[in-house]
């Protein structure tokens, strides 16, 4: 029987697309704390272009970008899209998903209806001259992030994605685990493998900030899979064993140090001297954790403002500090003397391309990277779990939200039908 709207977990006939769907929706009038900004609504099911894919979403991953979307900062994502001509006055977020291909555009050839997939969040215009020239699409002018800079993300029964975003779901994973890793995993993979001349090599020491978080947990495992040696930085005793279980050769508790923050002016002998003493002590802690007096070939950065001075001081000659965020602030300071004299690289990195997304997915399929799913939420807890992330009260690892999958532990669409 076909219907206009299906309940969560009520699986339509394969390929049947109802005109409306349930979604967790953000509207401008609700901008503010995530717990209030997300509300369940019935909205039209999106229509497809020639190279689009409609995914019946089983589970969605949780990332900080939709904390920003819910609060309307640093940009109003709805207003930004409307300026480009889009008509929807709402935002459906979600930049990670697992699910079933339910409908495809007329020019889609890489997936078919019924395929089980995970979705990466990199989008770009196929007609972009940069892409047509064979250059890296992740730095194309048209590149944007699905479920944040685009609408129709994974916090809905159906998500609209581009064909190239779809990758095979690791068959052994539950729907919620499969939804949890791609954004952070592909981001970490590009940071460690995407910058030629400074890619992680066997034996390389790598300093990983926030080792127990979503990004850090992926980075530790990717370093290990490449034969490198990750030293993780954490804040809390309970996170030390967690990082070692993921493959870190050592762990540093940053609470032992107090030199964090903006770099003092080099000419202020007293303040700079205090900072330098702290940075050197941190360097000694890295050597102790590594078991060798060797500096990191790569520093995996994302805190930014409070840690970057130490990262640049720590990095080995000819090494790379690679950064994808600024979770502690955006004003970066570093001592250029260490930077140019030791010929270090300071590299910005933002998500990934198709090949890099496939790279981390292959590691997950091979069992070399675990999604590190720490907690699973119900669909109507979408706002609550983003509120936890906003308040930095979320658990280590990654989180997921059940959408059409009715309970944790299900692996296939047949499981979902039986559970329903």
Image (cartoon, rainbow, N blue to C red):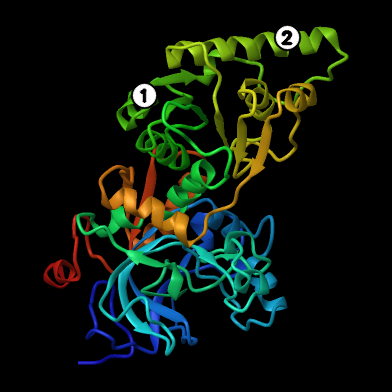
**Quadrant of image for the N terminus:** bottom left
Please give the residue where the numbered disc 2 appears in the rendered image: 274
In this picture, residue 346 sits left or right of residue 60: right
Mark 2–mark 1 distance (CA, rounded to whole Å): 29 Å
Mark 2 or 1: the one toward you: 2
Q: Which sits earlier in the primary sequence, circle 2 or circle 1?
A: 1
In this picture, residue 298 sits left or right of residue 362: right
Question: How far from the left and from the top, in percent, is residue 24?
Answer: 44, 68
Q: Secondary structure at mark 1?
A: helix
Q: Foreground residue, 280 or 18?
A: 280
Residue 180 seen by the camera = no
Q: Which mark is residue 238?
A: 1
Answer above or below: position of 348 versus 243.
Answer: below
Q: Which residue shows up at 54% across the image and 54% down it?
A: 351
Residue 66 seen by the camera = yes
Answer above or below: position of 253 versus 379.
Answer: above
Q: Which residue shows up at 68% across the image and 78% down it?
A: 82
In this picture, residue 222 sits left or right of residue 273: left
Q: Which residue shows up at 73% across the image and 27% down it?
A: 339
Q: Quadrant of residue 309?
A: top right
């Amino acid at each position: 029987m076909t219907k206009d709207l299906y309940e969560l977990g009520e699986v339509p006939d394969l390929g049947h697309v109802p005109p409306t769907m349930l979604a967790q929706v953000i509207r401008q009038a609700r901008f503010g704390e995530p717990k209030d900004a997300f509300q369940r609504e019935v909205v039209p099911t999106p229509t497809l272009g020639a190279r689009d894919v409609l995914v019946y979403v089983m589970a969605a991953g949780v990332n900080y970008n939709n904390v920003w979307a819910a609060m309307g900062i640093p940009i109003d994502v709805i207003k930004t899209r409307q300026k480009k001509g889009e008509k929807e006055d709402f935002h459906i977020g979600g930049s990670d998903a697992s699910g079933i291909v339910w409908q495809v555009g007329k020019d889609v050839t890489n997936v078919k209806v019924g395929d089980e997939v995970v979705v990466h969040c990199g989008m770009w215009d196929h007609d972009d001259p940069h892409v047509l020239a064979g250059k890296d699409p992740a730095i194309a002018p048209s590149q944007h992030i699905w479920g944040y800079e685009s609408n129709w993300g994974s916090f809905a029964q159906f998500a609209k994605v581009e064909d190239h975003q779809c990758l095979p779901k690791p068959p052994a994973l539950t729907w919620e685990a499969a939804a949890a890793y791609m954004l952070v995993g592909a981001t970490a993979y590009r940071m460690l493998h995407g910058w030629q001349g400074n890619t992680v090599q066997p034996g390389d020491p790598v300093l990983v900030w926030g080792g127990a978080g979503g990004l850090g947990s992926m980075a530790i495992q990717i370093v290990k899979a490449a034969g490198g040696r990750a030293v993780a930085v954490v804040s809390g005793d309970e996170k030390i064993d967690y990082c070692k279980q993921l493959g870190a050769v050592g762990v540093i508790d940053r609470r032992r140090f107090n030199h964090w923050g903006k770099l003092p002016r080099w000419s202020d002998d007293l303040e700079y001297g205090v900072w330098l003493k702290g940075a050197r002590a941190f360097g000694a802690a890295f050597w102790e954790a590594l078991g060798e007096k060797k500096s990191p070939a790569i520093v995996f950065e994302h805190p930014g403002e409070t840690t970057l001075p130490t990262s640049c001081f720590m990095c080995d000659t000819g090494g790379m500090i690679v950064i994808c965020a600024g979770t502690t602030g955006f004003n970066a300071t570093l001592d250029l003397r260490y930077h140019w004299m030791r010929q270090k690289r300071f590299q910005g990195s933002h998500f990934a391309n198709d090949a890099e997304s496939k790279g981390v997915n292959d590691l997950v399929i091979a069992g070399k990277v675990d999604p590190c799913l720490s907690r699973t939420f119900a669909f109507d807890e979408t706002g609550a779990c983003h509120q936890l992330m906003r308040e930095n009260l979320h658990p280590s690892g990654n989180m997921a939200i059940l959408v059409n999958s009715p309970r944790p532990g299900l692996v296939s669409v047949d499981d979902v039908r039986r559970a329903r």
